[in-house]
Every structure is written in C-alpha cells, then in structure tokens.
Image: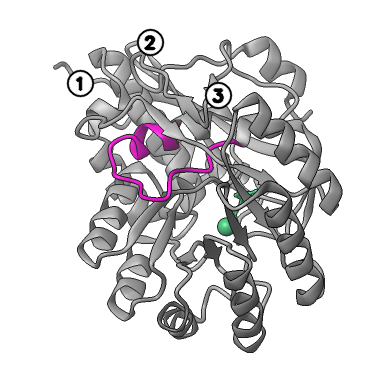
C-alpha cells in the first residue's frame, strides 16, 4: 500500500447533559465533558477517537481542558506528516516524546484504528485479531444519590429488560449509611439480580474490612476498588480475606500496574478501561497478564460517550469477560453526537459492525454542544 500520512488532527470539547445527577464518591456529575479527536489522513479518510474523564480532575490526573491542550500543543504537531499506516509506530513515537497522558494516547490510537479499519473495510475488532461476540452484556449504575429513587430506577429497567445487573456507587457517605443503602436496594430487587458496588477508593483498609463483611453477608456479588489505588498490598489482603471477589479499577491502570497486581494477587477481577491503559492494544496486553494469573476481566468505562464506548466495545469483543461490561455511558446522556445511537436491549449492547468503529459523527450535534 502506498504510504498515507496524517494530514492534521483536531480536537473539541463537547459538553453533554446527563439524564440525572450521577453521584460518585468523589464528584456529582450533571454533564459529561468529552474530548473528541478527529484525525484526517492524506487519502481523505478521517478517524475519530475520544478522551473522557469523570468530574474534571476529581477522578484522575487528567482534565478535559488539559487533554485538549496536550493534543493541540504537543500531539498534533508531532504526528502531522507521519505515516498513518502503522498504529504501533505512531504509539511508539508518542511513548518516546510524551510521558503519561494515557487518555489522549487512547483517543489517538482509537482514531488511527478507526481510519485504518475504514481504509481496509474491516472493523477495529478485526484489526485486533477478531471478535468473539457481536453483543456485550451491559450493567446499569444506580447513582441517583437517593435509595428510593435507585430502587425505582432498577425496577423500571428490570421491567423493560434493558439491564439485568446493577452497580451501586458508594463511598460518599459514612460507610454504615452506605451499607444500609446497598442492603436496602439488594433486598428490594431480590436475590436473583446481580449487584456490585464501586467504592472508588473511599475507604481505609480497616473500614473496608468491616464494610465488605456486611456487604458479603447482604449478598453483594463484587466489590470494586474499596481502598486507595496505591495500596496494592491492601487489595491483595482483601482479596485473600474475603469470598466475595474484589475488583481492581483505579489500581489496575496501566499494563505495568496489571503485572504488579497480578504478581501479588491484588484483586480477582480487573476493570479494563482503554483510557487508563492508554489504548486498545494495551487492553489486550493487560488481559493476557490477568488471564495468565487466573484473574477475571470486566469491561469498564470512564463514562465515555458513544465514540469511546464503541472503541472499548471493539476491543472487549475480542476478549472473554467473565464479569461482563458497564458500557452504558451513552445512556447516561440526554443527547448524542453520532448519526445513529447504539442499541441497548436484553441486558446488552449491539456492537456496530461497519468498517473501523462503525459509527459516524453528526457534525450538527458536535457544533451544537461544542464548548465555545
Ligand atoms: C468507575 O470508577 O468505575 C463506571 C461506572 C460509573 O458509574 O462510574 C464509572 C467509573
Ligand atoms: Mg470503578
């Protein structure tokens, strides 16, 4: 194939409102700010990607404004004129010039894979070795901030069949209040519905021991990131101590984090996220490490919109995910910026099957919600 270059890269911040406030231990989200990357190639093909975090700087080291600045100031000039045909060569170049900044690296890699898939007429999953499924299970997160409202939301979603598994966000309140909240919801929706909790690092190890004992007794199926992400040994101790599985999310950020955790048994499940890992190809590396250590996989989200969600779905579709996914991000938003919204039904999502990501931006919507 004749060489094809990256002609230019553009980025915009798009702010979309959420359907209701979303309460997490570190922030309450009322809208989502997504950085959308457009990578134009010399053959006229455009690839798209997304870099999204949660609650400004409250989730991690990267903010929407900082990510846009990194893209415009450092990444776009570096990549302009480089060959668009080898994703690995571009990612190696990025790695040598830019430390960290995994969220934007993931967005760039997504856009390159999207462009290459469109060029070759195959899906991103095909470029990554091939999908093992065309649908993915998707849970819903109950996080209205009110126990009764969460119960009503769960009942409505069980009735219409869109979801059959729920995750509860806790860690904002005193731990005993949180345990009562979780137990009330679990009791109201019954023993057959899977319920997990995400503490988003809010507890000390000593509190976690007391709280998880009660959550285990209440029949909770999985405990996500109960303690601070840097306490790998603590995560290993909790994993050893409890029967209920412990999932590493924030702790299992990069490929090397996955390796260090796997070595000491820090978690029996890893939440994979393309943003934390710095791209889709790194997800496959993390997955290989986890699976060699007997650790199960879960398809995580940074509450991305449709672009980031589909990018995640493309790589997740190449893996065996024992704990399903939480790729519900687009459903939390009142509007979308793609031409065709995703289909969610029967507890899962359908993965677009067209070339590349299989989706296209609706530029009128991008224009409407673009930060001015
Ligand atoms: C997280 O920490 O897992 C995923 C679902 C949700 O509601 O928040 C995210 C982030
Ligand atoms: Mg989490």
Tell me the quadrant of the picture where the C terminus can be found: top right
The residue carrying pointer 2 sits among few (fewer than 14), some (14 to 19) or many (20 or more) residues within 10 Å by Cα, namely few
Is there CB contact under 8 Å for labels 2 and 3?
no
Disc 2 target residue: 44
Residue 288, relative to residue 22: is it above or below?
below
Left or right? Give the position of 148 relative to 165: right
Q: Position of residue 360 (x, y in %)?
A: 50, 14
The quarter holding residue 163 reads: top right
Disc 1 target residue: 3
**Highlighted range, magenta:** 311-328
Q: Find out if the beta carbon at label 3 lies less than 8 Å from the nearest ligand 1 atom.
A: no
In this rendered view, identify the residue nearer to me: 286 or 279: 286
Q: Secondary structure at mark 1?
A: loop
Q: Secondary structure at mark 2?
A: loop
Tell me the quadrant of the picture where the N terminus can be found: top left
Residue 105, relative to residue 121: is it above or below?
below
Q: Position of residue 311 (x, y in %)?
A: 43, 33
- The answer to whether any part of residue 371 appears in the image is yes
Residue 22 in magenta stretch: no
Label ID, residue 344: 3
Residue at 47%, 78% in the rendered image: 242
Left or right? Give the position of 14 relative to 144: left
Instruction: Spot the residue most to the left.
Output: 1
- The answer to whether any part of residue 204 appears in the image is no
Residue 177, relative to residue 289: is it above or below?
below
Q: Main secondary structure of the magenta part?
A: loop
């Amino acid at each position: 194939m004749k060489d094809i270059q990256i002609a230019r890269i553009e980025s915009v911040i798009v702010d979309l409102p959420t359907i209701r406030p979303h309460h997490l231990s570190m922030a309450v989200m009322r809208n989502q700010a997504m950085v959308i990357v457009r990578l134009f190639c010399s053959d006229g093909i455009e690839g798209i990607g997304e870099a999204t975090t949660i609650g400004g700087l409250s989730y991690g080291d990267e903010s929407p404004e900082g990510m846009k600045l990194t893209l415009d100031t450092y990444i776009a000039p570096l990549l302009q004129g480089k060959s668009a045909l080898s994703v690995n060569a571009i990612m190696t170049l990025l790695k040598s010039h830019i430390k960290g900044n995994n969220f934007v690296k993931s967005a760039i890699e997504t856009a390159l894979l999207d462009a290459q898939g469109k060029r070759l007429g195959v899906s991103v999953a095909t470029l990554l070795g091939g999908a093992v499924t065309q649908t993915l299970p998707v849970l819903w997160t109950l996080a209205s901030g009110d126990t009764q409202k969460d119960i009503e939301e769960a009942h409505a979603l069980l009735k219409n069949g869109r979801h059959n598994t729920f995750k509860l966000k806790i860690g904002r309140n005193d731990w005993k209040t949180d345990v009562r909240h979780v137990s009330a919801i679990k009791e109201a929706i019954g023993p057959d519905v899977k319920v997990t909790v995400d503490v988003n690092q809010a507890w000390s190890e000593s509190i976690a021991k007391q709280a998880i004992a009660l959550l285990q007794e209440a029949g909770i199926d999985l405990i996500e990131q109960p303690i601070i992400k840097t306490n790998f040994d603590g995560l290993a101790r909790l994993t050893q101590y409890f029967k209920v599985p412990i999932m590493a999310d924030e702790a299992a950020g990069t490929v090397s984090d996955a390796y260090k955790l796997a070595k000491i048994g820090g978690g029996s499940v890893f939440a994979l996220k393309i943003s934390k890992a710095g791209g889709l190809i790194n997800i496959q590396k993390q997955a290989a490490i986890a699976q060699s250590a007997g650790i199960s996989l879960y398809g995580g989200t940074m509450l991305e919109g449709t672009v980031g969600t589909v990018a995640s779905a493309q790589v997740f579709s190449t893996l065996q995910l024992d704990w399903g996914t939480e790729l519900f991000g687009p459903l939390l938003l009142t509007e979308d910026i793609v031409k065709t919204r995703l289909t969610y039904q029967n507890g899962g999502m359908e993965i677009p099957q067209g070339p590349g990501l299989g989706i296209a931006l609706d530029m009128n919507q991008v224009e409407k919600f673009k930060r001015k």
